[in-house]
Amino acid sequence: MKWKLTARFLLSVLSIVIIVIFLNTAILIGFFIFQQVNKYDNTTSYSEENFVREFQQYIDISNGTPAVSKDGLQQLHQRNAWIQLLDNNGQVVDAHFAPDKAPSHYAPIDLIQVYKYKEFDVDTTVYVGSKESISYLIGIKGSGVIRYVTHFSGSSVLQFIGKFGLLIVIADLLVATLVGWLFGRTLTKPLYAMIERIRHLKNREHMPNKMPGGVYKPVFENLNEVSRELAAHEEERKRLEMMREEWISNVSHDMKTPLASIRGYAELLNDGNLSSHEQTEYAHIIEKQSLHMQDLLDDLNLTMRLRHQQLPLSLTEVNMVQFIREIVIDTLNTPQYEQANIEFNATKDVIKHHIDEHFMRRAVMNFLHNALLHNPSDVSVTILVEDHSITISDNGKGISAEDLEHIFERYYRGTNTEQTYGTGLGTAIARDIIEAHGGTVTITSEEQQGTTVSIQLQEDKKE
């Protein structure tokens, strides 16, 4: 995979380089042709070529004898130029400002030589013009014009391309390959590392990797963060799985205990030697154990429905003050809690909310009974009802920080819980019921300082 990514990127770089080379070559050729075609179109009226070509207007020919007008002489003087007028035989018939070493007769080859090369001095460029039967040479000193003579043929161009073109292309490709490989390796190495990191995450290998610098650093930071979160979730999943297995074992044990009692007392009832009082007592025990089993099954069914958000709520408008007061009274009328110290307060006489009375009663009673059940008998519990909250606080022995962290987890029993009767689902069920009503629950506690349960109710839109 690593070399495949590098090869793909390298191929892309080479393709781009080849295209750029051909495109640049085409542009250069086109620009050269355009320059040559438009060379004379772009020159101004003051160029030297135009000056020589148009100088014939200053030459007057009378009876075959040429003469330069005064304006022409003035133009030559301004240009720092000289002129020689030649007849058909190349003989100089007139001259102005010409150098002393200028020939008085020019053969055709001399004209070509003078035009192509700077025969007089390196600072003078000679141009050739004509008018009727008269030819003229104009030399311009200090023009700065440089002439290059190039000789080539089609075969020589092909030979040049054949000798050097292929070498240039090969050299360019080698350079492009080297640069592309280095550049591609720099880019594809972290990509390969990312693919490997994702593969490790897929295989649940959550060891943090070294983060390279550069543009990919945030990506690896996020991958390491994802790895840490997945590792934490995996540990949490394993812990919950162990708790679930422990809970299943406890529930199985709790189910076996009442089943054993029911079976034992049922066998005793089959004995015809029992008195009426004994039969009644045994029947009462069987009923009690069967109700306990029913509670276990109901809790298991309810927690599964809450877990899948399938709890049907039958909402009615209820005065929360009267509702909580009745829960307190019912608790105090229970023989187990008839000596409990419970203080009830409310900020108003009437605070209405739409709730499901059955489920909300169970949730509130769970928190209230926990405050009484898991604390000494002299504990004081205070219940405060406000517009959108219910607060249950006690001055008991409190909850340890470790237990408080897992207080709402299913199947969890705290280490300071002396009572083992129940399913370990009460607090989680109570929390889920409150959340099903759109509210929230928070529990704060300090050991030997007490515990406070805050139930925040959703603002009732129907009020």
Image (cartoon, rainbow, N blue to C red):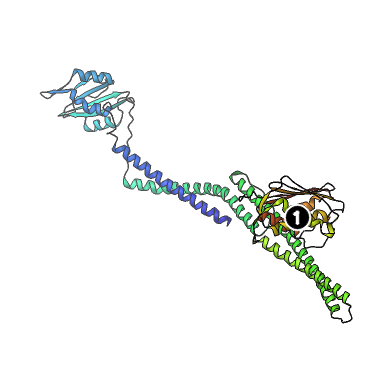
Q: Name the one closer to the observer, 223 or 145.
A: 223
The residue shown at (52%, 52%) is: 9
Instruction: Residue lying at the far bottom in this picture: please name it.
Output: 272
Q: Tag 1: residue type? A: Glu
Q: Quadrant of the N terminus?
A: bottom right
Where residue 405 appears, x then y in whole percent?
Answer: 76, 52
Position of residue 449 relative to residue 292, above or below, is: above
Q: Name the one closer to the observer, 63 or 267.
A: 267
Q: Name the one closer to the observer, 205 or 274.
A: 274
In the drawing, does residue 74 fall left or right of residue 242?
A: left
The residue shown at (72%, 50%) is: 321
* Residue highlighted by disc 1: 326
In the drawing, does residue 276 fall left or right of residue 143?
A: right
Q: Give residue 114's quadrant in the image.
A: top left
Any part of residue 74 in sight: yes
Where residue 163 appears, x then y in whole percent?
Answer: 41, 48
Any part of residue 407 in sight: no
